[in-house]
Structure formats: structure tokens, C-alpha cells
Image (cartoon, rainbow, N blue to C red):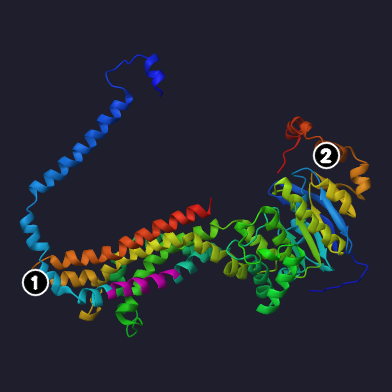
Amino acid sequence: MSKADTHVQPRKQGLTRRQKRAVSRGIQYAVFVAALVALGVTADWGRLQNQFAQADLAKELFPDIITLALRNTVLYTLSGFVFGLVLGMVIALMRLSPVGPYRWLAGLYIEFFRGLPALLIFIFVGVAVPLAFPGTEIPGGTYGKVALALGLVAAAYMAETIRAGIQAVPKGQMEAARSLGFSHARAMVSIIIPQAFRIVIPPLTNELVLLFKDSSLVLFLGVTLEERELAKFGRDLASESANSTPILVAGLCYLLVTVPLGFVVRRLEAKAGEATK
Amino acid sequence: MSTEVSSAAPEIQVKGLHKSFGDNEVLRGIDLEIGRGEVVCVIGPSGSGKSTLLRCVNLLEEPTKGQVFVGGTEVTHPDVDIDAVRRRIGMVFQQFNLFPHLSVTENLALPQRRVLGRDKAEAAKVAADNLRRVGLSEKADAYPSSLSGGQQQRVAIARALAMGPEVMLFDEPTSALDPELVGDVLAVMRMLANEGMTMMVVTHEMTFAREVADRVVFMDDGVIVEDGSPEQVIGNPAHERTRHFLSRLLDPAMADVEEEVSDQVGKGE
């Protein structure tokens, strides 16, 4: 729409398109401001502050909330991630196997664990596994159980991501490797999987963020004082002090990790997008 | 695996080869022999099956029927150790297919170490020697993505040579290159031919075929139509189909018109 057009075609309605756009944007801002004002007026800020932002209570949380709770959260997440990555890799390769039953089994696994809430898996690992195999203990105690529960769920998502990554490597790479005398398995390990991993690093980092939050489900396994992670720690101290400030601080601790990780993911995605151009 | 090598036996021997993709029969009975040190160029219109034939030689494509022998070993035998056979057959692809996550030197060294079991120092030495042969010593530490198409293809040739192959297969090695980069790649191939390498080259480069090939094979519609010296096949073709193909190649202005006609007659790749 150039200026010449508006001169040639006389306006039929009162507003031009440009004016309509301006009005529409103005209304959106107005709604936003109105919502903020309504929230500010109706919420009881004094009580909120009393319940969630007691500075002296917050101070008492340190350093335990970092050295114990955050540390445990990170440990739970990493153990679940590592176990999930290994299992996910195996399932992804099964999904691509020429052997029918492997493909079928892997597909079943993925559908099963993606279709269930992580919470149920934690309860299952905490209750059903000890019942089914009496006398046997999952190695690593709580850490082992968390790695198992988180890893079982994460593996289902990661398997699909890794499979997509492997399939995104051009066919010519396998052909070149095979023509040089690589066996199929060796070509996979030396040529295809290293390239697939470059492709799936951003989505896998995303998965790490999800696991970091899901590690809060540990509280359903029943943990000792030393094994508490952020969510349990915050909740316990909140009920001790009859004040919710610890919950708010625990939440901030999660954001301390997830926000930078999210930033890293976006950077990696931008880089990957550039590389494929 | 019974391996019989006699000096009289051809390096590559194809007997009664058929290949179908579903209902589409791409190769319809191919017989071909290539002697040691011979350079054979395979020409023909797209969809004639010439790339498929080349890919059957190292079993990247599984033939539907027929036999292929390389250096006396039957490649098509069900119990053959195909990885062992492929070590003796170098292959160069239209799209280069360098490993993008590895540097140029690693592209040459990794296959030697993983497949041939050479130690690090020896693999690096062989890599350097072969990079020098293709004139790219200065690119040893570069990554494939920073190289031109012509340079990538020369690295791909060096990578195949580093395995010490007895035979080299070239699948349209210059078709993906900008015209000004074709010469460098052809020069390397010419050098190999002069050194006595057995070469099977699928190409559209008629000048190269005329000057370097010992024999030219013209394929159309899944069969070998003509097989002879370059002077014979390119200079004085005996068959109407060969003449037709060559005239289209030499006079591209006619190609569009005739493409439509041939599209109606038979479907290409």
C-alpha cells in the first residue's frame, strides 16, 4: 500500500488500515494495564508479603538450601539424565533395528512411558519394585531409585529425539563409511552417532530442564533429611515455620538453574540453525 | 570364501546382472569385464542404470540376479565378507560425502585406523601422503564445510586412496561441481589413470572419457548398448541410441524438446 494508492482509491470507511492497526495495538496495551491494575488492587499484598517474603526466615535457609537441597536436586537430575541417556540410546537403536520384535518393543516402551505421569512411575519404583523383588535393593539407595524412576521416563522422550537425530544424518554418510569397509555397527559408532548427537544437543538440554523440575517428585519416595531436594526442603521448612517463604526461595533456586539453561538451549538452537543453512 | 586370483582374470567382472526397485527394472542383464589397470567410462542418459551398475560392484545396491566378481572374489556370494571386499574398492560419490564432524586429516586417518587397524602415526603419514597427491596438503587441518566443492571431492578421492584400494569407482564425481572446479578433480583422476589404477567412472564429461578412458560403455534403459574404444563409441557410434544421446549432450538447445518426447516414451529416475 503506497501513498499513491490511497490517493487514487478514495476511502470507503472512516479509518485506513494503518489507523486500524494503531487502534488495535492501543486496545491491547489498555487491556494489559487494566489487568495489572486489577491484580494490584484486589490482591492482599500485606498478607502475601507476610506469608511468602519474610527476610529473616529466608536468611535462615542459607546455606543449607544451596549446599544440601540444590546439590541434591542437581545430583538427582544428573543421575536420572545419565541413566535415561544410556537407556534412550539403546531404545533408539532398537527402534531402528532391522529385527521386528526389537522395533516393536521399543515402540511399546516409548508409548508406555510417555503416556504415564512421572509421578506414577516414582510410586511404582518406590513401592512395586521392592515388593516384586523382595530382598534386592536398588543400588545407590535413594539416588539409585531416583536415577531409575527419572531415567525410565526420560529414556522414552530421549529415545525419540535420538532416533530423529540419527535419521537426520544424510544417507550418504552411511554409504561412504560402508564403502570404506566399515561394518554397519562400526559406522554407527564412529560416523553416524557423533553427527546425530550434534543435532540432538539442544533438545536433550531441554530434556535436562524438564528432569530438573521432575526431580521434585522424589518426595514421593520418602527421603531422609540429608536426601531432601529443593521442593521437599522448601515444603518441610514451610510447615515447620508455618510460613511459605521457604517455598518462594526454593522456587527462586529452581529458576537460578532453569533460566540460564533455557538461555543455553536457545543459543544452541540458533547455532544449529546456522550450521544447517 | 574362495579367492582365486590369476593375472589373466579381469579385475571387475559382471555376469548377467539384473536389478529391480519394486516393479521398476533398472538393470536388465549386464555383462561387463574390466581388466587390471583399465579405465572404463560409463556414459548414458539419466535413468539408464549406470549409477546403479556402479553401486552393485561394491554391493551398495544388492543385485536382484546375476554375479559380480572383484579381483576374483564373488561380491554377490551370500557368505562373502563384504567389508573385506569393500576395503579393496575405493568409491567416490557425486555429493563427496566427507564426514563433516572430522577434519580433513581425520577424514583420511579414521577409516584407516578403524577399518585397517593402522596405528595413529602410520595413518597420519598415509593421510599426509595422499593429501599431497591431490594437492591439498595445506588443508590438512581444515573442516570439510570450509572447502570448495572441488577441494572436497579431491579430499574424498584421497580418503579412498588412503585405504590402498585395487579398484576405484567414481559415481558422477564432477556433476555437483561448479564448472570452473571440474578441472582440478579431473586432473587428479587423470593422474590416477596414468599411475595404472583400475577405474570405473560414471560420467557426463565426454572430453575426459575421450582422452583418458581405455574403453567407453554406453548404457540406455538398463542394458549396455555399445562397448568399445572412445574413438569408436564417442567418435563413430554404431547405434542410433548412442548417436541420439551424444547429439543431445553436444547440442543442449535441443535437449528440452527431446526431453519431453522421451518423457512420454519412458520414465527416467
Inspect the magenta stretch and tell me whether residue A140 lies in it. no
The x and y percentages for residue A169 are: 56, 58
Which residue is label 2 attached to? Answer: B245
Q: What residue lies at 43% left-to-right and 58% top-to-bottom? A: A268
**What's the chain of the residue with tag 2?**
B
Task: Tell me the kind of residue under disc 2.
Answer: Phe
Q: CA distance from mark 1 to mark 2?
A: 90 Å
Instruction: Identify the mark at residue A154; answer none if there is no mark.
Output: none
Inspect the magenta stretch and tell me whether residue A73 lies in it. yes
Residue B183 visible in the picture: yes
- Magenta segment: A71-85
For the N terminus of chain B, the quadrant is bottom right
The x and y percentages for residue B246 are: 84, 39
Q: What residue lies at 8% left-to-right and 69% top-to-bottom? A: A242
Q: Are marks 1 and 2 on the same chain?
A: no
Q: What residue lies at 87% left-to-right and 61% top-to-bottom? A: B194
